[in-house]
Amino acid sequence: MSYFTPEYLKFFRGLAKNNSKTWFEANRERYENEVKKPFTAFVEQMIARIHAEDAEVRISAKEAIFRINRDIRFSKDKTPYKTHMAALISPAGRADHETPGFYLQFGADMVMLAGGVYTPANESVYRIRRAIVNHPKEFQALLQDKEFKKKYVTLQGEANKVLPSEFKEAALQQPLLANKQFYYAAELEAETILKKNLPELLMQYCRAGRGMNAFLKRALGK
């Protein structure tokens, strides 16, 4: 079965051109029926599938799905709405961005799939770096895993220009130690959401990142 129709993409392409409260309210019924309901149903399906392979994930779709409203308090961009729907499926859901999980983002221009740790606190960055230094072979094996490389290539994230002295020598062998973010991501065409095998396809991406998530989770003591 297909969870989404072309109307999902049409809604967000319209919102991208008319990102205002007036336009959104005029199209709220479209949003509820063509976007919110099918996305919620799909996230429920993905949670069930992930739970079947990871019993710690037992959240509701509501706990996973992010609001469509943007937080514009500290942003120069004052457009009120995101032009995508997104969810974080993990033991903690969207309430904790440090807990490694599986992130889904379906928008007008692309599908994004991601995992790892996107916003670690300073102490968490230290713990991850310590784990990489203590288990270099395991970490390297995860980076070289065939499916991980095929789906995500490598870990991404902003890096520190200056590292604490205890990591400098090890960073010569493993440059990712300089990272202050440890996430991986893949982008697919927006029309991917129209595929009938969408849940199975996304589970392939979820499984490809599971080993890296487990490593980061142990490093953080989650």
Image (tube, rainbow, N blue to C red):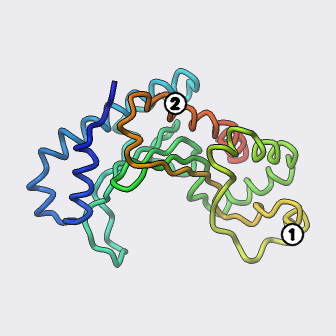
Quarter of the rendering occupied by the C terminus: top right
User: Between disc 2 and disc 1, whose residue precedes?
Assistant: 2
Say few, some or many: other residues with alpha carbon within 10 Å of mark 1 (under 14 / 14 to 19 / 20 or more).
Answer: some
Cα separation between marks 2 and 1: 36 Å
Amino acid on which the number 1 mark rests in the picture: Lys
Q: Which residue is mark 2?
A: 57
Where does residue 173 sit, x and y in percent of width and height? 88, 61
Residue 118 at x, y = what percent? 57, 56
- Position of residue 124 relative to residue 39, above or below, is below
Left or right of residue 130, residue 203 in this image = left
Q: Residue at x 43, y 32 (%)?
A: 198
Q: Position of residue 41 (x, y in %)?
A: 32, 31
SS type, badge 1: helix
Q: Secondary structure at mark 2?
A: loop
Q: Is residue 1 left or right of residue 31?
A: right
At label 2, which amino acid type do we have? Answer: Val
Mark linked to residue 17: none
- Crowd around label 2: few <14 · some 14–19 · many ≥20 (10 Å): some
Q: Is residue 180 left or right of residue 36?
A: right
Name the residue: 24% across, 36% down. Answer: 37
Q: Is residue 176 or residue 127 the one in the foreground?
A: 176
Instruction: Look at mark 1 in the image and give the residue it sits on.
Output: 168
Q: Is residue 84 left or right of residue 55?
A: left
In the picture, residue 196 is in which quadrant? top left
